[in-house]
Image (cartoon, grey):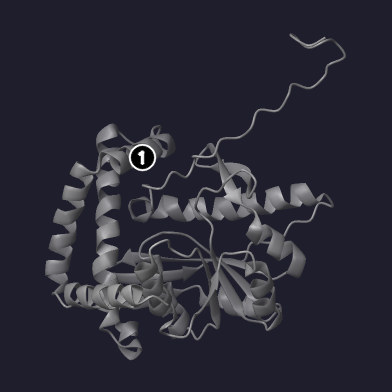
Amino acid sequence: MKIADQLGCALLTVTLRLLGSLSLTNQERMARWMGRIWFALDRRHREIALKNLTAAFAKEKRPSEIRRMALACFTNLIRIVFEVGWSLGTSLDRMPRFFTICGLSHYTGAMKRNRGVLLLTLHLGNWELLSVVAAMAKIPAHVLYRPLDVGALDLFFNRYRSRFGARLIPNTRGSMRNILKALKKREVVAVLMDQNVDWYEGVFVDFFGESACTNQGLALVALTTEAPVVPVFLARHDGGFMAEFLEEIPLVRTGDRRMDLEENTRRYTRALEGVVRRFPQQWLWVHQRWKTRPWQPWPRETGQKQKGRP
């Protein structure tokens, strides 16, 4: 571990704790102003958010409403910074004052199957605080994550996410082995599955009416292990945070491996879309979710020569 990364991590920790020590009123005020400034100056991400929201809600909302939703998305991301700082200075025994957990029976019921549980989640609200929820609910959680390119940031988030007992599985070549090992021990693996992937990593399924390349890894693990898949998310609600576990998504088997991967991934994505529709201002609209486009198949033969072909 590089000394520069350790120093950077320490500096980031101190800075975030200082921001988190501000009163909640000041945190909210600063987040709103910083969100507006970011929205005004960052043309690239502003246009991504507006384009994504327009594609998703053009038939339901006016352009002025879509612009307000995009601005709220930027403010949401700034609020995460303050909330992470606040949580660094808050002990676990104080957390229940700020968190409400709903639908926990869906998780406990799935655990009774003795196959471990796959928690399906997304970048909504303050997803970084899901580790707090796991600790409060005494969930033996492993979190699949993508290592960050900046060493100091990667070190900080490794320490932050594991400080209440969650164990991290880097999304690298050996991740599948570690996931299977955790499920074999009847433990829990949390997977974020709402981001774009390259065509060779996923399958194309509908998301807000557009074909989105979606990681097929969760479906592959579920089909291999028959571990139940339970969606969970964390949203801001009534001045605090609400974690909600949804009903288990039944596993589909058609006898065709490719169709199984596609259909189960489609069902998982549909569940995530339902959550985003409930809290659209708290999702990560600055991400290029539809960046990877479907390939165009060669036209099928119809018994006659295709145009331009011998």
View extreme (right): residue: 303
Mark 1 residue crowding within 10 angstroms, few (<14) / some (14–19) / many (20+): some
Q: Give the quarter of the figure containing the N terminus.
A: bottom left
View extreme (bottom): residue: 93
Quick check: 51 above or below 276? above
Q: Amino acid at mark 1?
A: Ile
Judge by depth and name the residue closer to the eye, 266 or 249. 266
Q: Give the quarter of the figure containing the C terminus.
A: top right
Q: Residue at x 37, y 35 (%)?
A: 51
Judge by depth and name the residue closer to the eye, 69 or 217. 217
- Helix, strand, or loop for circle 1? helix
**Is residue 239 visible in this depiction of the protein?**
no
Q: Position of residue 139 (x, y in %)?
A: 53, 82
Q: Quadrant of residue 32?
A: bottom left
Q: Residue at x 81, y 51 (%)?
A: 254
Quick check: 64 above or below 197? above
Q: Position of residue 122 (x, y in %)?
A: 47, 60
Q: Residue at x 27, y 84 (%)?
A: 90
Q: Position of residue 119 (x, y in %)?
A: 56, 69
Q: Dot 1 corresponds to which residue?
A: 48
